[in-house]
Image: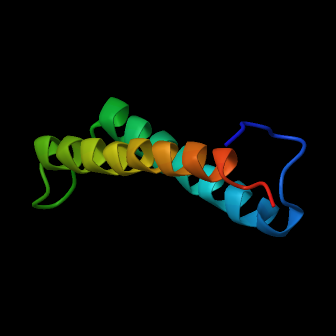
Amino acid sequence: MKFSLFKNDKSTFWDEVILAVISLVCLAVGIVIIILKPSFWIIEASMTVTAGVLIATVGVMFIPALIYRLMTNDK
């Protein structure tokens, strides 16, 4: 098991890129929602902050999966 970004299995390259993009998008959306604290109609600011924390947590949960994929992608 080795960690390499450049000498890896090329057939799983796009899987790893998509997983990284999903993780970054979840983190970005979660952080933006936490910072802006939007509230509208019957949804209060505390509810949107909670949703932002949950979305950011999903993004963080994908990071170990990405690291594992990068470490075990040799042929």
Identify which residue, 24 or 42, lies in the foreground.
24
Q: Which quadrant holds residue 38?
A: top left
Which color scheme does this rendered protein use? rainbow
Residue at 26% across / 49% down in the picture? 54
Q: Which image quadrant for residue 22?
A: bottom right
At a point 22% along the width and 41% down the height, the residue shown is 49
Residue 72 lies left or right of residue 11; in this view the side is left
Q: Judge whether 18 appears above or below 63 on screen.
A: below
Residue 6 drawn at (x, y percent): 89, 41
Q: In this view, does 42 lie to the left or right of 10?
A: left
Q: Residue 19, image x and y in percent?
A: 61, 57
Residue at the image position 68 percent from the left and 47 percent from the top: 70
Q: Check the picture and name the quadrant holding the C terminus.
A: bottom right
Picture coordinates of residue 47 (x, y %)?
14, 49
Count of numbered circles on the image:
0
Residue that protrudes farthest toward the bottom in the picture: 11
- Above-or-below relation of 36 to 74: above
Q: Where is residue 67 in the image (x, y as percent from the top left)?
A: 58, 42
- In the image shown, does 38 or 32 lie closer to the viewer? 32
Name the image quarter holding residue 35. top left
The residue closer to the viewer here, 70 or 58, is 70
**Which residue is pictured at 37% across the width and 43% down the height?**
56
Quarter placement of the N terminus: top right
For this view, does 5 lie left or right of residue 3? Answer: right
Residue 48 falls left or right of residue 12? left
Considering only vertical position in the picture, is 28 above or below 22?
A: above
